[in-house]
């Protein structure tokens, strides 16, 4: 099919081989005209030299003569041919290698000629006996890349040993002993592999998308929790500041009242003293006037009638001391401390409720338990039986100390569990990293991989270097352990009293953490991993 409508003059001045307007036209002895390149290439592919139009045979290859008149007319026609609006070869289609003008779409490719042909230029391969033997395939681009560079043959096999495409001759030489299969067979294998790879990749993409969603959800949740925590913290600190301000005001009022009492007493004493001074001054004036009279009769009569001196107070023992403020400040601080402790105690109960939400279900791992330890069937209880059992040794088992870890470990996030310690007189509990020493003596500190709380007859201790001695809590029955792996936090709680015992902050976790128990008393009650009861 032509790409566009052609005029009568264009059809009559077109080469019968390329079907385009003549380019450098030549004439054969039989009078037919062709493009020089078209007829030359045509005869190069023939066994006999004949005219493509009338099939006249020539004994020798004709000497072609340029048709000057036809060449001039063809040049004029080429200048009048309109540019086609659409190319004949669409994108992703293989163009004909023979077309010299507007390229037509190739319908076949020849593996012997290494050339792709449109329907018109394919005609010799369908007519000429020698060309009919050529191998025609569906149109292929870059045919030279499909040929063996060594043997100039089609790459139609696949060497499974060296994972390369080979031709038939390669299997008889360099790849003689190698297993080879047709390209289609290997294509199907590799396609299946790619299909699986694509499935795996898509699954990985979905997993990562899900992880992104989880992270974003966590960030959103964290923002909401942070807003709630800031609001709650603001209320708490406002209440605490209110307590401090009230304590300050009460202290100031106490000091002012003491000062006011002292000032009042001083004013009252001064008023009495001033009155006595006034009375004594009057008496002094009267005595002074009488002492200056020389009339004996008047003096004696007046002296007899002179009033007795006004009564006065003995002021030698009277004094006004500055008010004493000794202990006033400390009594106020003691009262403030008591108030703050009450407020803090109220606040710690919600804190425990928050961490209890991160409860995890853990069970003790018998493969890690020291040979003297006895575990319950459900893996929730442990006590020291006092007898070393013969057990299979393994790298996980503790052999130096009566330790045991849980089956479960944690490498991120937050987790919380509770251990009943009632009636047990010697115990350790907390978390330990995976690489702790299990066969030899060691110290039990964060530096060696232990974050633990211990209790014995010497008291309650967070084990560190040095140890942190803690106030001994009466009737400690159940201990809660909370870990925030990402924040590097380990906290211990008195569950019954609903208060925090101790927090280790700024911890660095680089390995999985395992909940950890140690029962150091043969005659004591077992340590029990208990379910969380938030109504306690």
Image (cartoon, rainbow, N blue to C red):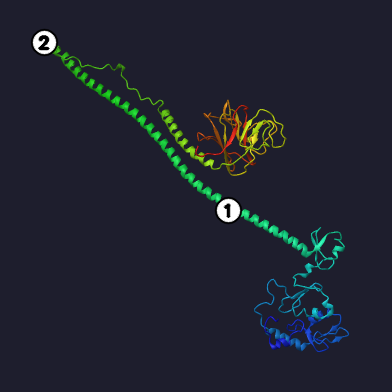
Q: Residue at x 65, y 55 (%)?
A: 203
Q: Secondary structure at mark 2?
A: helix
Of residues 279 and 261, which is closer to you in this image?
261
Q: Position of residue 511 (x, y in %)?
A: 65, 41
The residue wearing badge 1 is 213
Q: Residue at x 44, y 42 (%)?
A: 235
| Quarter-of-image position of residue 323 | top left
The residue wearing badge 2 is 297
Sequence-earlier tag: 2 or 1: 1
Q: Residue at x 70, y 88 (%)?
A: 9
Residue 208 visible in the picture? yes
| Quarter-of-image position of residue 19 | bottom right
Q: Residue at x 56, y 52 (%)?
A: 216
Q: Is residue 484 left or right of residue 134?
A: left
Q: Secondary structure at mark 1?
A: helix
Q: Residues within 10 Å of mark 1 (few under 14, many from 20)?
A: few
Of residues 309 and 34, which is closer to you in this image?
34
Image quadrant containing the N terminus: bottom right
Q: Is residue 30 left or right of residue 368?
A: right
Q: Position of residue 486 (x, y in %)?
A: 59, 43
Q: Is residue 318 above or below residue 240?
A: above
Q: Is residue 84 above or below residue 527?
A: below
């Amino acid at each position: 099919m032509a790409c566009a409508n052609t005029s009568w003059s264009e059809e009559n001045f077109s080469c019968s081989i390329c079907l385009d307007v003549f380019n450098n036209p030549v004439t054969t002895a039989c009078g037919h005209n062709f493009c020089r390149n078209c007829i030359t290439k045509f005869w190069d592919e023939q066994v006999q030299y004949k005219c493509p139009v009338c099939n006249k045979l020539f004994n020798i290859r004709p000497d072609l003569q340029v048709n000057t008149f036809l060449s001039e007319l063809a040049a004029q026609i080429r200048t009048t041919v309109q540019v086609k609006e659409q190319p004949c070869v669409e994108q992703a289609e293989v163009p004909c290698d023979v077309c010299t003008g507007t390229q037509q779409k190739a319908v076949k490719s020849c593996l012997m000629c290494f050339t792709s042909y449109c329907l018109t230029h394919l005609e010799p391969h369908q007519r000429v006996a020698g060309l009919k033997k050529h191998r025609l395939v569906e149109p292929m681009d870059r045919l030279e890349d499909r040929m063996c560079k060594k043997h100039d043959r089609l790459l139609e096999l696949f060497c499974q040993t060296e994972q390369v495409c080979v031709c038939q001759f390669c299997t008889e030489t360099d790849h003689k002993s190698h297993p080879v299969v047709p390209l289609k067979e290997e294509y199907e294998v590799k396609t299946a592999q790619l299909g699986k790879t694509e499935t795996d990749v898509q699954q990985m993409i979905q997993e990562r998308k899900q992880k992104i969603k989880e992270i974003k959800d966590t960030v959103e949740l964290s923002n909401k929790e942070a807003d709630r925590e800031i609001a709650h913290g603001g209320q708490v600190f406002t209440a605490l500041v209110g307590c401090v301000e009230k304590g300050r005001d009460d202290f100031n009022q106490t000091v002012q009242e003491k000062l006011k009492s002292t000032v009042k007493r001083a004013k009252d004493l001064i008023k009495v003293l001033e009155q006595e001074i006034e009375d004594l001054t009057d008496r002094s004036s009267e005595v002074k006037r009488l002492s200056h009279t020389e009339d004996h009769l008047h003096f004696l009569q007046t002296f007899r009638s002179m009033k007795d001196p006004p009564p006065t107070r003995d002021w030698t023992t009277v004094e006004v001391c500055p008010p004493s403020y000794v202990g006033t400040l400390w009594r106020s601080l003691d009262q403030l401390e008591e108030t703050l402790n009450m407020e803090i105690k109220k606040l710690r109960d919600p804190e425990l409720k928050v961490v209890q939400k991160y409860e995890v279900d853990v069970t003790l791992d018998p493969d890690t338990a020291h040979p003297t330890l006895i575990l319950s069937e459900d893996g929730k209880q442990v006590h020291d039986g006092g007898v070393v059992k013969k057990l299979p040794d393994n790298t996980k088992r503790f052999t130096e100390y009566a330790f045991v870890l849980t089956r479960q470990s944690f490498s991120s996030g937050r987790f919380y569990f509770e251990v009943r310690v009632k009636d047990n007189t010697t115990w350790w509990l907390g978390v330990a990293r995976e690489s702790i020493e299990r066969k030899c003596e060691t110290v039990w500190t964060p530096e060696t991989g232990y974050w633990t709380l211990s209790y014995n007859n010497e008291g309650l201790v967070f084990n560190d270097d040095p140890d942190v001695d803690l106030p001994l809590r009466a009737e400690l029955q159940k201990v809660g352990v909370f870990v925030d792996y990402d924040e590097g936090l380990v906290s211990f709680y008195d569950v019954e009293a609903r208060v925090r015992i101790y927090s280790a902050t700024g911890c660095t976790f680089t390995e999985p953490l395992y909940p950890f128990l140690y029962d150091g008393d043969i005659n004591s009650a077992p340590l029990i991993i208990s379910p969380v009861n938030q109504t306690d």
